[in-house]
Amino acid sequence: MRVVVFSVLLFFITNYTFAQQRQYSTTDREAIKYFALANQSLDDHLYDDAIGNLQKAIEADNKFVEAHAVLGDLLRQMRNYKASIEQFHKVIALNPEFNRAVYLKAGEMEISNAQYELAQQHLEKYLTYPNITAQNTYYAQKLITDCKFSIQAIAHPVPFKPINLGPEINTEADEYLPVATADEATLIFTRKINNNEDFYKSDKLNNKWQTATYLSDQINTPQYNEGAQSISQDGKYLFFTGCNRPDGLGRCDIYIAQKKGNDWGKPFDLSPPVNTTGWESQPSISADGKTLYFVSNRKGGYGGYDIWKSSLTEKGWGEPENLGPNINTIYDEQSPFIHPDDSTLYFCSNGWPGLGGKDLFMSRLGKDGKWQKPENLGYPINSSGDENGLSLTANGSYAFFSSNNLNGFGGFDIYTFELPPNLRPKLVTYVKGIVNDAKTKAPLEAAVEIIDLQKNTAVYQDYSDATQGDFLATLTAGKDYGLNISKSGYLFYSANFSLIGHEAKNPYNILVLLEPIEVGNKVILNNIFFDTNKFDLQTESIAELQQLVSFLTVNPTVHIEISGHTDNVGNDQLNQTLSENRAKSVYQYLISSKIAADRLVFKGYGKTQPIAPNTTEDDRKKNRRTEFKIIAK
């Protein structure tokens, strides 16, 4: 910082202090003596001494314009904005035409102090001077845009009632960058103690956060900083930033760690092309785990720090793609958070119109697959200072953030607040399941796949936990989904469920009991669909049929009977024929998929084997089904 301070101070000093033949605005010898001493202190990088000498020069002659100007710029660089503004105002009052740069610097500081009307006046005055560089003209115009936006934002505030998460999480140290799992059962955040950043976690019991504990010796280190993390929705994978580690590629790299039981495995550095010899940080992983958003200053960007994304391929993480000019500016964009709806991005920026420093923004993914121009989250969520590190709950109603301006327990504390409805993402909920052995009830590690039935594409693919058998997936509300679960040595599980009209705040819970491959065991193919009174397979059935093909391919000795069933409505003979034709349609699909015909038989049972009373439409729907049964293994 000190080198930066000195170099920027030359902006004023070279203009009107070191020219020995210059006629100062004062003739007071004492004032000039202290001013010369201040210049010497600046040469020696003794900035506190420089401030003291400049103050003495002003005490000797309060109309010493040059001393006020240099002191104002020095205080600006030391981030003492209020005192800096006072000095710039003295310069303008003493000599309005002393130096045009005073108006630019004063405007910049006044924005930082939320004095937007005054800042706009000074910036517009600055632009009246001739021969201003294109870069400074652009910057001044940008600041004027910020002023105009800020005046309107303050006149139309958004609801904002931050709530401190309490002493279980917040301490006298700094706590920041909070992220929660989809079920809001676990919160992971960074705590800074003795200038060392480590991860801590808190679990929620009975709707109350418990006392935070050290995350893991596998991830945290005593000599390096860990921060800027992203937790997968099920809490099993942690992406985070590690800097200056011996196994890193650049100054800061992105690492990933996987949860192992109650602890975490050793993290590893993501290989190129995600990490480079440059600076990669602040990861955010999509709900399906297939897209990683992060910040980098690599070549090919629009400004200093840009937001990029990399997609997971069969060969690993693909070549990163810049999010483009609708997100990134010539300034800095950081702290991305991709919501589980996979179409709403939150981030901070000092490039888009804001209230000063870095503001929080939101962008939605358009129908064309491109990010739309971002929307400022508004005042007082944003202020004249820096806001960053926002994350949301899966249901999108509440946000987490950190602040040191709200009279907390000390330093930065973590808060939550209800997000205004117009700033919320799409409604999502989560499916939470447990997979057990049907006989022993022991938890199983099984492949879990959830299909968007309308698009016939997988929206979740992972494994249930080996020790607890659980899995969790966030899903967009208002859609129909298919669920397939498979494990070697077991029949696969098939189900479908609808989140149309489902309360997004309530999870969809499911217990799955996998049956071992034994003669006589059955599987209901819940994702095989037919039109009413027809036997042509609907396209939504393809994913399920392919699951059955895979099962038969992996288990080449298994023989099955495919059976069709109906409810008791209508003519018995027609129902019998319909059930047989539906079973035959599945049989023919399997043969067309290279499954040997001698391993397959099909049969229609009509209404003769109900699994529920035919007294309600829901029960009759259960009876209208397609099954397969193991007849040999």
Image (cartoon, grey):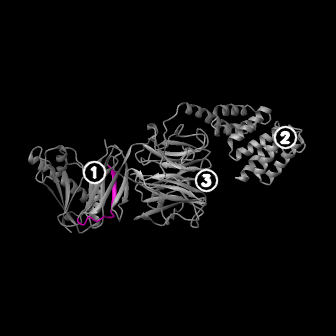
Q: Image height check: is 93 above or below 435?
A: above
Of the image marks 1 and 3, the number of the one nearer the N terminus: 3
Of the image marks 3 and 2, the number of the one nearer the N terminus: 2
Mark 3 vs mark 2: give the one in front: 2
Relative depth, front residue between 462 and 470? 470
Secondary structure of residue under mark 1: strand
On the image, numbered disc 1 is attached to which residue?
496
Of the image marks 2 and 1, the number of the one nearer the N terminus: 2
Q: Residue at x 27, y 67 (%)?
A: 489
On the image, numbered disc 3 is attached to which residue?
299
Residue 139 image-quadrant placement: top right
Q: At label 3, which amino acid type do we have?
A: Lys
Q: Marks 3 and 1: in contact by CB < 8 Å? A: no
On the image, numbered disc 2 is attached to which residue?
60
Q: At label 1, which amino acid type do we have?
A: Asn
Q: Could you tell whether 538 is left or right of 256 in the image? A: left
Residue segment shown in magenta: 439-452
